[in-house]
Image (cartoon, rainbow, N blue to C red):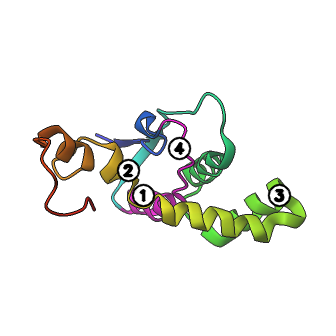
Amino acid sequence: MPIIMGEYYNLSKWEELPVVITDAICYDMPMYVKMGIKGITYMHLPLGNWGVKAITQYIYSNLSWDPTLDKETLLNDYFEKRYGRNAEAMKGVYAKLEEAFCDVQIWRSWAPDSILSQFLIWNGNIPTKPLD
């Protein structure tokens, strides 16, 4: 039976945060093919205010059709078409956003080690150490 991958790159728990995850998508998509995935679904298309998240749609859709595409070629194409003469400056902005949100999962999920789970069991006392 063929296995199909369901997209979770645009999770609603990130709401309107400017989360940029190109590194993860460019790593994941070829790995799915190597694992034998035969199809891909799209589950969380943002309805508005795409902003910097448009790159997620661009990278995901292109790699869905051809997961062997070169990451740098895709990124250069995106930035040149979207930002023209400001492409290089915007690459820096996106890189900073990707770095800033690299730990977003621990803040926005209910996993046992997440910040939200720590708040859930917090007894109201002064913490003995700062949050991660």
Residue 92: x and y in percent read 68, 70
**Separation of residues labelled 4 and 1 (CA atoms):** 29 Å
Left or right of 17? Residue 112 is: left
**Residue shown at the point (57%, 54%) measured from the top left:** 63
- SS class of the residue under badge 3? helix
**Separation of residues labelled 1 and 3 (CA atoms):** 31 Å
Quarter of the image holding residue 108? top left
Disc 2 target residue = 37
Please state which of the two labelled residues, at mark 4 or mark 1, is closer to the viewer: 4
Q: Amino acid at mark 4?
A: Leu
Q: Nearer the viewer, residue 16 or 132?
A: 132
**Residue shown at the point (35%, 55%) measured from the top left:** 36
**Separation of residues labelled 2 and 1 (CA atoms):** 5 Å
Lower sequence index among marks 4 and 1: 4
**Separation of residues labelled 3 and 4 (CA atoms):** 21 Å
Residue 33: assigned label: 1
Q: Nearer the viewer, residue 94 or 100?
A: 100
Q: Residue furthest right?
A: 85
Q: Nearer the viewer, residue 1 or 60?
A: 60
Left or right of 109? Residue 55 is: right
Residue 26: x and y in percent read 52, 62
Residue 83: assigned label: 3
Disc 4 target residue = 17
- SS class of the residue under badge 1? helix
Q: Amino acid at mark 3?
A: Tyr
